Image (tube, helix red, strand yellow):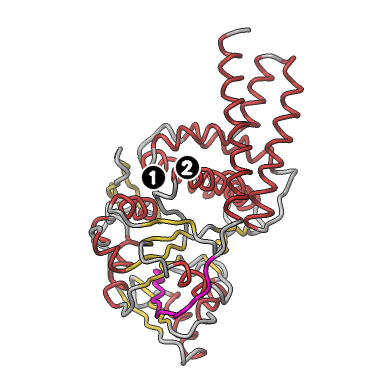
Amino acid sequence: MSAATAVLLALLAGALANSLLSIVAAWRYLLVRPPGLASPEPVSILKPLSGLDPGLESNLRTFFEQDYPAFEILFAVREPDDPAGAIVKQLQQEYPEIPARLLVTGESPYPNAKVHSLSVVLAAATNDLVVMSDSDTRVNPRLLATVAAEFQDVHLGVATCPYRAVPDSSLGSRLEALSMNTNFIAGILVARMIEGMRFAVGPTIVARRRVLLAMGGFERLKDYLAEDFVMGRFAAEAGYGVILSSYVIEHHIGSTDLGHNAAHRLRWARSTRRSRPLGYLGQLFTMPLPLALLLCAAKPACWPVLLLTFAARAMAAYVVSARVLEVKINWLLLPLEDIISFGFWIAGFFGNTIVWRGRRYRLHRDGRFELLSPS
């Protein structure tokens, strides 16, 4: 047996073990149920907006329709003529009983414009329990009741909501959603089981206002591209509890061409590598199919291992996607997506610049980033 074959066998064994771990981690997560809500506390929903995302009105409407006795919604746009503001004003008229405000933040002085918008609306919020949610998320009326019940734990500081990615019709969108609904969430579940939640991810995060201020506020997050990740990390380092919420949101991925989709995924890969370097290396063990294909290329007699690998990968994908996220899997696209994800994972090791909302940034080793040019 050659050294290359031995290394591939060892890596594949680790990837198969990780598939089994993700199944166990998913079942353990499914056992978690939020406690009953004894005394609802008021909640502030913080919504940074920028332009017209696909389905924006439908997304925002679900937050106005929460089955919860006391909450407010604060929206932020950078320019007064942002078209997202017109939708907010329309919804304010439709739901006059819901306290909702639209704030114009101006141009961001921070590298991370979203963090600046959040800092402005947090300063205007009246409640300690805050829900920070992106414009491309959609929820059912039970979101606030569920997370408020979880935050009855006085030691809890931050909760990150897992999400099911909902694609549009484009191939790039469907492939990216498939990756999120299988590999990405599986990695989070395994990390939760092995080391506990010491980070936050995703487009909806719940936190105590006093916890955010105690760890340095949004001023401390302004230079990070993955502000969600470090928010959870800083909270955990400060001694506050961080959990993966039992509430699953919907994250709607717009329809983009393959070029834009590739740029987005490369940006995510480069950012993740700097936010959590060891975790990024460990992502190799979430890719059993590419490893099995490489093994078969090196030693064709190992082809039966490929069948075993696909069976393990399919079982893990089913448990994570169908049971935890309650989404269907496109089995024909799954092998293709695994190969593409492997390619983006390798590409993430190269380059230190990204393009985000038309601006080019340089990424630093500690996860911070800086503006290079306006276009």
Residues rendered magenta in the picture: 34-49
Main SS, magenta residues? loop
Q: Left or right: 262 with respect to 119?
A: right
Q: Left or right: 308 with respect to 294?
A: right
List x then y, in percent, for residue 55.
57, 70
Q: Left or right: 303 with respect to 40?
A: right
Q: Nearer the viewer, residue 43 or 40?
A: 40
List x then y, in percent, for residue 207.
37, 65
The residue under the point 32% across, 42% down is 363
The residue labelled by disc 1 is: 354
List x then y, in percent, for residue 145.
51, 75
Residue 211 seen from this side: yes
Residue 49 seen from this side: no
Q: Nearer the viewer, residue 327 or 367?
A: 327
CA–CA distance in space, label 2 to label 1: 8 Å
Mark 2 vs mark 1: which is more N-terminal? 2
The residue labelled by disc 2 is: 266
Which quarter of the picture shows residue 105?
bottom left
Q: In the rendered structure, does residue 37 fall within the stretch colored magenta?
A: yes
List x then y, in percent, for residue 90.
49, 86
Q: Of helix, strand and loop, which one carries label 1?
A: strand
Q: Nearer the viewer, residue 64 or 102?
A: 64
Q: Say which amino acid is labelled 2.
A: Leu
Q: Is residue 114 above or below residue 335?
A: below
Which quarter of the picture shows residue 274?
top left
Q: Where is the N terminus found, in terms of image quarters? A: top right
Q: Say which amino acid is labelled 1.
A: Ile
